[in-house]
Image (cartoon, rainbow, N blue to C red):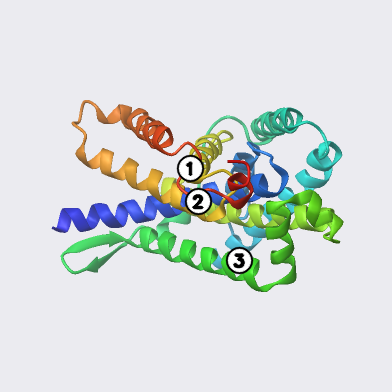
């Protein structure tokens, strides 16, 4: 029972991290129909910000990191994506790949290809005893932070004017503009929130691994994209659900697969995702915009 409880907490923690990855991807896709693969470089930027801001207390470092990533996200929206906003979706996709490639190489040029280390995990590497199991403090922090962010985002989308406008734009962007929704403000807000989520994800990821590399954002954005597809493209709740499902699958397979097969765990995760999509091609949660097309 202790092993089952430990694996359950690990699955929730990993799923929480994947949910943050997926939510940042889904938020931009819902409004712009853009699969923003440069979202991974926002995570990388946040990780390097933690390396650069190494002197102040932890709270100051985290706040500075979040501000830096939000500013970077808004800058990318203004410089890279706004000029091609009305272009074909394939053009937007190529643009996101190009931005990702440029930022990766810029990071290598500035910081080098050698991994950097941080002391961020020293404050969170202790365990907390819950009954008969020892739970890493980082896992509890990851779960708590994710729940707070999900609740805050839900309240923002439901109870604020800008949030309602973002939901309207996600359902029918052209109609929302005809009704007076300001496109620049809504899209900038979406990028800003995605940057905030990326900054939080970067902080938790660096605290988990202790190292920073120029390509560390690649894996999170891939898993975030997969979770978004599994949950249902265009559905924020589906992206969160997909993130938890993918994270839980990884932990369960890691605990149950034979030792000689565990290096291929991700292949089993992707196979399971494919099987789910065969059963539900539109994802676990069908967005309203997608439901109208079915």
Quadrant in which residue 213 is drawn? top right
Rendered position, 190 above or below 255: below
- Asked whether the beta carbons under mark 2 and mark 1 sit within 8 Å of each other, the answer is yes
> Which one is in front in this view, the residue at disc 2 or the one at disc 1?
1
Image coordinates of residue 169 in percent, x first then y, are 73, 54
- Asked whether the beta carbons under mark 3 and mark 1 sit within 8 Å of each other, the answer is no
> Looking at the image, can residue 283 be seen?
yes
Rendered position, 124 above or below 285: below
SS at mark 3 in the image: helix
- Asked whether the beta carbons under mark 3 and mark 2 sit within 8 Å of each other, the answer is no
Q: Would you name the residue on which mark 1 appears?
A: 283
Indicate left or right for 135 with 45 as reference: left
Residue 85, label in figure: none
Q: Would you name the residue on which mark 3 appears?
A: 60
Q: Would you name the residue on which mark 2 appears?
A: 238
Q: Residues within 10 Å of mark 2 (few under 14, many from 20)?
A: many
Quadrant in which residue 45 is drawn? top right
Image coordinates of residue 59 in percent, x first then y, are 56, 67
Q: Nearer the viewer, residue 220 or 291?
A: 291
Indicate left or right for 210 with 125 as reference: right
Image coordinates of residue 245 in percent, x first then y, are 38, 47
Give the quadrant of the C terminus: top right
Residue at the (35%, 55%) spot, across then down = 12
Q: Earlier in the sequence, mark 3 or mark 2?
A: 3
Image coordinates of residue 161 in percent, x first then y, are 74, 70
């Amino acid at each position: 029972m202790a092993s089952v409880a430990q694996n359950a907490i690990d699955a929730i923690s990993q799923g929480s991290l994947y949910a943050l990855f997926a939510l940042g991807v889904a938020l931009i896709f819902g409004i712009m129909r853009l699969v923003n693969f440069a979202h991974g470089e926002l995570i990388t930027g946040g990780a390097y910000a933690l390396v650069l801001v190494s002197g102040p207390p932890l709270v100051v470092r985290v706040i500075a990191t979040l501000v830096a990533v939000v500013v970077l996200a808004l800058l990318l929206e203004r410089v890279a994506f706004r000029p091609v906003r009305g272009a074909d979706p394939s053009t937007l996709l190529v643009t996101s790949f190009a931005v990702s490639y440029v930022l990766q190489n810029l990071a290598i040029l500035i910081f080098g290809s050698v991994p950097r280390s941080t002391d961020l995990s020293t404050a969170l590497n202790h365990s907390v005893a819950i009954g008969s199991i020892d739970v890493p403090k980082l896992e509890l922090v990851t779960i708590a932070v994710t729940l707070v962010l999900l609740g805050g985002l839900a309240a923002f989308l439901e109870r604020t004017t800008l949030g309602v406008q973002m939901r309207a734009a996600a359902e029918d962007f052209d109609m929302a503009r005809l009704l007076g929704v300001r496109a620049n403000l809504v899209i900038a807000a979406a990028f800003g929130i995605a940057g905030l989520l990326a900054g939080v994800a970067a902080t938790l990821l660096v605290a988990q691994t202790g190292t920073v590399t120029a390509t560390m954002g690649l894996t999170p954005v891939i898993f975030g994209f997969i979770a978004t597809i599994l949950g249902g493209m265009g559905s924020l709740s589906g992206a969160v659900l997909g993130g938890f499902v993918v994270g839980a699958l990884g932990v369960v397979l890691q605990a149950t697969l034979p030792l000689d097969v565990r290096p291929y765990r991700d292949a089993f995760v992707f196979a399971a995702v494919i099987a789910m999509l065969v059963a539900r091609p539109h994802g676990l949660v069908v967005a309203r915009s997608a439901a109208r097309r079915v």
